[in-house]
Amino acid sequence: MTKTIVVTSGKGGVGKTTTSASIATGLASRGFKTVVIDFDVGLRNLDLIMGCERRVVYDLVNLVNQEASLHQTLIKDKRVENLYILPASQTRDKDALTIEGIARVMHKLKKSEFDYIICDSPAGIEKGAKMALYFADEAIITTNPEVSSVRDSDRILGILQSESRRAKMNDDPVKEHLLITRYNPGRVQEGQMLSVDDIVELLAIPLLGIIPESPTVLDSSNAGKPVILDQTSLAGQAYSDAIDRLLGESKPHRFMEIEKKGFLKRLFG
Amino acid sequence: MGIFSFFRSRQEPRSASLAKERLQVLIAHERSDRDGPDYLPMLKQDILDVIKKYVAIGEDQVVVQLDSQENCDVLELNITLPDGTEISPKDDPKQSAAKTAKKSRVT
Ligand SMILES: Nc1ncnc2c1ncn2[C@@H]1O[C@H](COP(=O)(O)OP(=O)(O)OP(=O)(O)O)[C@@H](O)[C@H]1O
Ligand SMILES: [Mg+2]
């Protein structure tokens, strides 16, 4: 059965696209047929992070408007088997998408036997973000250890609980996961940044993982290669752990402490 | 008092705990707003407008919260009056409120 997961946050620039790319790549690497959809109409970026920007011909809006077929629109990843990218339109305005149109696309993806549909939400709590979360079975709430991000995460949780398809149909609620990204243990220890415990207590949803602030994330986006493919990177390892947990494995959380000498890291990792 | 304890611990920055406290309050408010009935924000605004007729008071000085208890909902109204308003329970509330209003230039 197909599972639809939205990566959302409310606040902009917290790491949704970075997360969507790595989560989709991670799931496909484990053998699941996965598609990652860029819902950021007008501000397409996922194609760059996935490194397929030069292969975009048709986009989500073409597909919704039935100007292109699913087969024509999906871009097959060159590195990872089972991985497909559905790019956003760069030119259209946000009103180009409708729930009915997206419902048709979701239906087609389900008929094509995708195991996972990952939806990369645009920032905000307006129509675009609501569209991206509407069909979700699960949600990855991407949060930075910072006041406005935590507040926006709570607001997006409110929207998931009242405006998603599952909420409107009185279905089981959307399963919520907290992913704390750009975490800087040093600044937490100095008392300058909210800690993992603080954020978990405030938002009161299960923790999927902690992605440390890491310079390799920038290198990876420069190269158009999702950071999860770089397993020497702490952020890459953290995303791998998150995939394990998403698939039901219980793993202790890492990356909460300041990195010691390296060998300690390996001992505890 | 909160302000002083914040400055006292200057050498050892505790801005994260301040952030947490503020978020706890804010998130609780926003949750009660959205979990409550649709009219709650409007009710809050109306109450605020009425109080403003008598006392110069800020948005965040009025807390309207709906608590769901076992078999009833309790509407909790918490109004912090600015310093200088001397309303004692024995006073006629209308009179003292009017006194303060004069002092604080209500528009
Ligand atoms: N763990 C991390 N460590 C360091 N930098 C990161 C990390 N995660 C994300 N970033 C950086 O943060 C910036 C924003 O990331 P990203 O584009 O994924 O956010 P977004 O939530 O999708 O933004 P938008 O709301 O604009 O769509 C990028 O420059 C990215 O490289
Ligand atoms: Mg993005």
Image (cartoon, coloured by chain):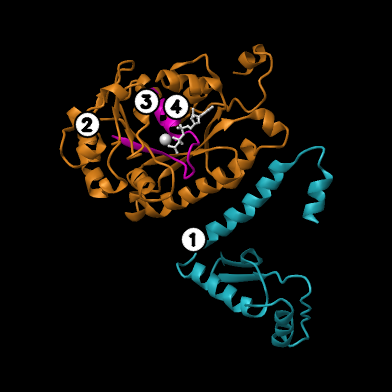
Chain colours: A orange, B cyan
Establish if A151 lies above or below B85.
above
| Amino acid type shown at disc 2 | Tyr
- Give the amino acid at mark 3: Leu
Residue marked by disc 1: B35
Secondary structure of the residue carrying tag 4 is: helix
Q: Residue tagged by mark 3?
A: A48
Tell me, yes or no, whether the two marked residues, 4 and 3, touch with CB atoms within 8 Å: no
**In this picture, residue B38 sits left or right of residue A252:** left
Give the extent of the magenta segment.
Answer: A1-25
Cα distance, mark 3 to mark 1? 39 Å
Q: Indicate the quadrant containing the N terminus of chain A: top left, top right, bottom left or bottom right.
A: top left
Q: Any magenta on residue B13?
A: no
Residue A58, labelled with which disc? 2
Label 2 and label 1: CA atoms lie apart by 41 Å
Mark 2 or mark 1, which is nearer to you? Answer: 2
- Answer whether labels 3 and 1 touch (C-beta < 8 Å): no
- Left or right: A148 in relation to A36: right
Image mark 4: chain: A
Q: How many marks?
A: 4
Both on one chain, marks 2 and 4?
yes
User: Circle 1 — which element?
Assistant: helix
Q: Residue at x 33, y 46 (%)?
A: A131
